[in-house]
Image: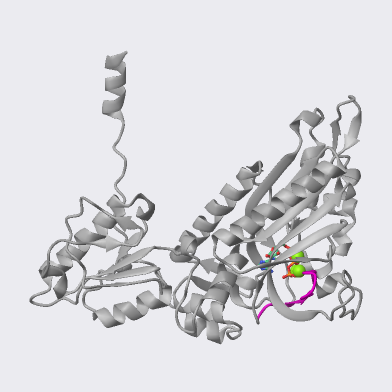
Amino acid sequence: HCAAQHARSACTPPMPVTPMPLVSRLFQPSNLREGQEAGGLTCHSQRLMLQAGLIQLSSPGCFHYLPTAVRSMEKLVRLIDQEMQAIGGQKVDMPALCGAELWRCSGRWELMGKEMFRLRDRHNAEYCLGPTHEEVVTELLASQTKLSYRQLPLLLYQVTRKFRDEQKPKFGLLRGREFYMKDMYSFDVSEEAALHTYQSVCHAYRRLLDRLGLRWVQVQADTGNIGGTLSHEFHLPADVGEDRLLMCGNCGFSANVEALEAGRMDCPQCLTQPLTESKGIEVGHTFYLGTKYSQVFSAMFTNAQNKPALAQMGCFGLGVTRILAASIEVLSSEDSIRWPRLLAPYQVCVVPPKKGSKASEVIHMAEELAHHLGNCFPNLKGDVILDDRTQLTIGKRLKDAGRLGYPYVVVVGQKAMEEKPVFEVSTGSCKDCAFRRTNSMASPT
Ligand code: ATP
Ligand code: MG
Ligand code: MG
Ligand code: MG
């Protein structure tokens, strides 16, 4: 047995070593001019993201997500996965190409109007590119003939591209025609159970936005063409927000204007106060659907009395690419990005001095420091980048670093060689550290 194991391990190829990320190697083209030419800059986050080489416009409302943006997106998706799985969500991945028949059944083939991207295959069958997936997921569930009440609640979610032919794609990733959404669909045995699930998803959304350190509001919302009877939106307050929100300073009531009777400006809950208006960016939307879709597709389960019953449903959307851009929109200054700490593409950037006769020893030390940080602090693994463009001055590289918004920048200058080995980083200090003090360490930008 041991011999076999030995032989096996001898044949196992070694794990590849991930090289130190280097700024000189990053594919991070600044696309500001092109962005300006192609339809103008409509908001702050769009300009910052183009300038820092996070995104590049491909066609109206469609973007390339460049490597640093993909790193942030992956971090955001990991957080979303944690929150959705903590409440029992199971991740799936449904087709983006959806047959028209399903949408005809629900009546939304017509209802969706011009916002739906429609196409035909070689046999002339009609399809759309999924703008949302209520029909697709309900049909998936309806095809399970042996679903028992013991398997419910069932919460299926995905993080996929959605397609909407927005009349006016604008604000960069805030309103795209192709964008990433996390959409979750819940199936429950009763209305009471479905409302319980609804509350637990709202709670998970609030926790996610709190973990990102974002200021948010939850408001009553209109159910639009998705339908249902109970609905909330999650907004980041911001002037570029396209939604008008009304709040009551007396009882805490809050709603999207769209959810109130036309023109009503007094609080419908306490009737005492005029409502105050502000603007918000919608980042999430929750719906209690009841049996609206399960009835159409006969999504049934066998209940405790061994009788068939319709599943009670909810659906829950989060704009993944919109959260990324909206958090940049609300947190950043005019010329530098500030990320929610958990989403920064890299946590630390180490900047060695400019090349010169006396610099080589310090440059070497900075390189070792960058390696060391990544190895000694598990939560920085892969998240430390070295700005190895030593042909440039420190000042020029600090300006770039500010633009991308690394939470920490460590400048290693000549003074780093002067004193005893001391090195600290705010995530904790390393008792085995063999490194000398860096001459300056910028705190969060
Ligand atoms: P909006 O009112 O901004 O058009 P919506 O109400 O049509 O959004 P939903 O159908 O509720 O959007 O979709 C769920 C989530 O998907 C939204 O809360 C938002 O975060 C995101 N989202 C919707 N449309 C877009 C878009 N065009 N670009 C980026 N994200 C979007
Ligand atoms: Mg919309
Ligand atoms: Mg909306
Ligand atoms: Mg919505």
Residue at (73% x, 61% y) in the render: 285
Where does the image place residue 47, in percent across and percent down from the top left?
A: 52, 81
Q: Inspect this view and state whether residue 133 appears.
A: no
303 over 244 or under it: above or below = above
Name the one closer to the observer, 399 or 28.
399
The vertical placement of 289 against 168, above or below, is above
Residue drawn at the location 79% of the way across and 75% of the way down: 248
Q: Nearer the viewer, residue 129 or 222?
A: 222
Residue 216 falls in image quadrant: bottom right
Specify the segment rendered in magenta: 240-255
Q: Residue at x 31, y 44 (%)?
A: 16
Task: Indicate left or right for 106 with 239 as reference.
Answer: right
Q: Does 151 lie within the magenta span?
A: no
Colour scheme employed for the rendering of this structure: one colour
In the shown orientation, is residue 267 left or right of residue 414?
right
Residue under the image location 84 percent in, 54 percent down: 103
Question: Could one spot residue 44 in this view of the protein?
Answer: yes
Figure quarter occupied by ligand 3: bottom right
The image quarter containing residue 278 is: bottom right
